[in-house]
Amino acid sequence: LDFGAPGLFRPFATHAFAKLPKKPGDLAATSPERREMLERLAGDAAADGLVLPFDLARAAWPLEEAWTGPYARDSLEAAGTAMRRCDRACVTLEHMRGAVPRADARRFALVSHLFLRCLPAPALDETNFWAREMSRATQTDLLFLLRRCAFHAAAA
């Protein structure tokens, strides 16, 4: 007996799953009690979606006073952390677009606030924040996060 042959397995499969729908759109054969229980568990179809709170103020630089991370709160790594928080907030707002009023405007405002008001602008002198020595990993991380935040601003 060879169960690997396509013709031999088909009768067994149709016999074992006789109660499953035969075509797309058909309902499975269920008892009325089971259907009533499933409808009760499914709940109201018109109920509002769950809106998760998200602290948009955490996407700021320098980091909060209580910061106890492995680097200084006003370092390049901290700027990466602020951009990462901004990216996560923008992704959350994008996913909750239907539940949060003006989610796209909030995303644009968040990215604009971080880059125009919080992070220091590049300067041409030696005191430039962005001209500090950094590792290749930090540079790659900052460029990746800069790209993500730019995409969020452009998509909003």
Image (tube, rainbow, N blue to C red):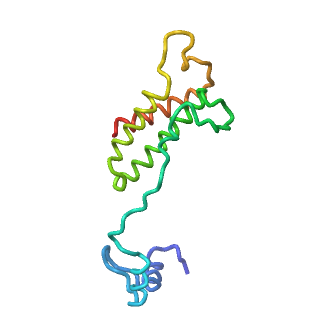
- State the residue in front, 126 or 142: 126
Query: Residue at left 67%, top 37%?
Result: 69
Q: Where does the image place residue 1, in percent across and percent down from the top left?
A: 55, 81
Query: Residue at left 40%, top 32%?
Result: 112
Q: Is residue 27 left or right of residue 147?
A: left
Q: Quadrant of residue 41?
A: bottom left
Q: Quadrant of residue 77?
A: top right
Q: Is residue 42 left or right of residue 2?
A: left
Q: Where does the image place residue 87, in percent across and percent down from the top left?
A: 47, 40
**Which of the image's four quarters has the C terminus?**
top left
- State the residue in front, 128 or 4: 128
- State the residue in front, 58 or 42: 58
Location of residue 88 with respect to 39 vertically, above or below: above
Q: Is residue 52 left or right of residue 155?
A: right
Q: Where does the image place residue 60, in percent across and percent down from the top left?
A: 51, 35
Outermost residue on the front side: it is: 65
Count of marks, rendered view: 0
Q: Where does the image place residue 27, in percent across and percent down from the top left?
A: 34, 80
Location of residue 126 with respect to 148 vertically, above or below: above
Q: Is residue 126 left or right of residue 147?
A: right
- State the residue in front, 48 or 30: 48
